[in-house]
Image: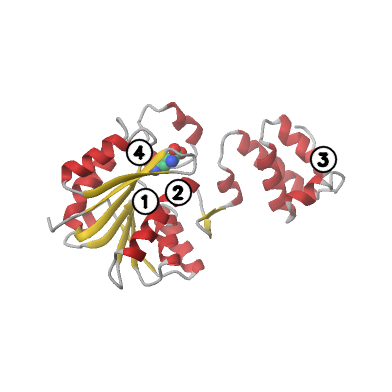
Amino acid sequence: MSHAPATVGDAMRHAGQAGVDRLDAQLLLGALLNQSRSWLMIHDDAALMPEQARQFQDWVARRAQDVPLAYLLGQKEFHGLMLQVNEHTLVPRPDTETLVDWALELLAATAPARPEVIDLGTGSGAIALAIKHRCPTATVEALDLSAGALQAAQANAQRLGLDVRFHQGDWWTPLAGRRFDLIVSNPPYIAGDDPHLDALRHEPLQALTPGGDGLSALQALVEGAPAHLRPGGWLLLEHGFDQSDAVTQALRDEGFEAVECRRDLGAQPRVSGGRWPGSA
Ligand code: GLN
């Protein structure tokens, strides 16, 4: 578009012509003008300041290139917490709340008074922070390989006043000799040749896919967990909609008990887990 949109109505038409969803356009414009969607709907004639119009044009152009809305806004709500996100962190998905809810159930029902929990591949810190927020008696730690992700996660913890300890490293390496009551992870699990990766190209590739058939990180987590779980401790893993058979089978083969899979908000099998019966 050659000239900047002068009003809310112009801006919405501009976004539509660029192929940006109406809802996304309203959320961007609402954030820019500090107004609600319902206000926008009845203020077509409200004027935009030139800087607002320029910022909106820039956001629309980037959204049309599949940049996630959360990166443009710089934040994403997850399990009741507002998290800051950037290009170093996977955008937290509502489906991952299934994993948090299951973890909270386990902590309420079975764990010791001060359970020790670790989130492997924490990204923005979403899972670890949500668990600490809702279960303050738990000692929660989190790990990621990416320094950029850890910086974002640490900043989120500090801003939200949640005491989570962070480590940098590759899965189990920094945790030698440590055991936990609950291990949770949303690892990279998309297959390396999955065509959906193109639409996710602005998110960190290493958070999305381990390459190959997408199962290698899940497999490494299942195999490594027994050496890091206390007897009766649980491992919960998010996975792809078509990976539940592979993950539940791997858990059983490894010796986990009470293995089950739970569905996400779209009714897809999304999180599998099991209880570790004894020491490894
Ligand atoms: N659930 C995400 C997606 O399909 C992927 C997250 C992941 O690989 N851990 O977009």
Q: Residue at x 38, y 59 (%)?
A: 105
Q: Residue 179, located in which quarter of the rendered image?
A: bottom left
Which of discs 1 and 3 lies nearer the camera? The answer is 3
| Residue at image mark 2 | 88
The amino acid on which the numbered mark 2 sits, given as a three-letter code, is His
Disc 1 residue: CB within 8 Å of ligand 1: no
| Residue at image mark 3 | 9
The amino acid on which the numbered mark 3 sits, given as a three-letter code, is Gly
Pointer 1 local density, CA inside 10 Å: few below 14, some 14–19, many at least 20: some
Disc 4 residue: CB within 8 Å of ligand 1: yes
Residue 191 in percent (x, y) is at 35, 31
Residue 213 appears in the rendering: yes
Q: Which label belongs to residue 189? A: 4
Pointer 4 and pointer 2: residues touching (CB < 8 Å)? Answer: no
Alpha carbons under labels 3 and 4: distance apart: 41 Å
Q: Is residue 39 left or right of residue 180?
A: right
Pointer 3 local density, CA inside 10 Å: few below 14, some 14–19, many at least 20: some
Q: Earlier in the sequence, mark 1 or mark 3?
A: 3
Alpha carbons under labels 2 and 3: distance apart: 34 Å
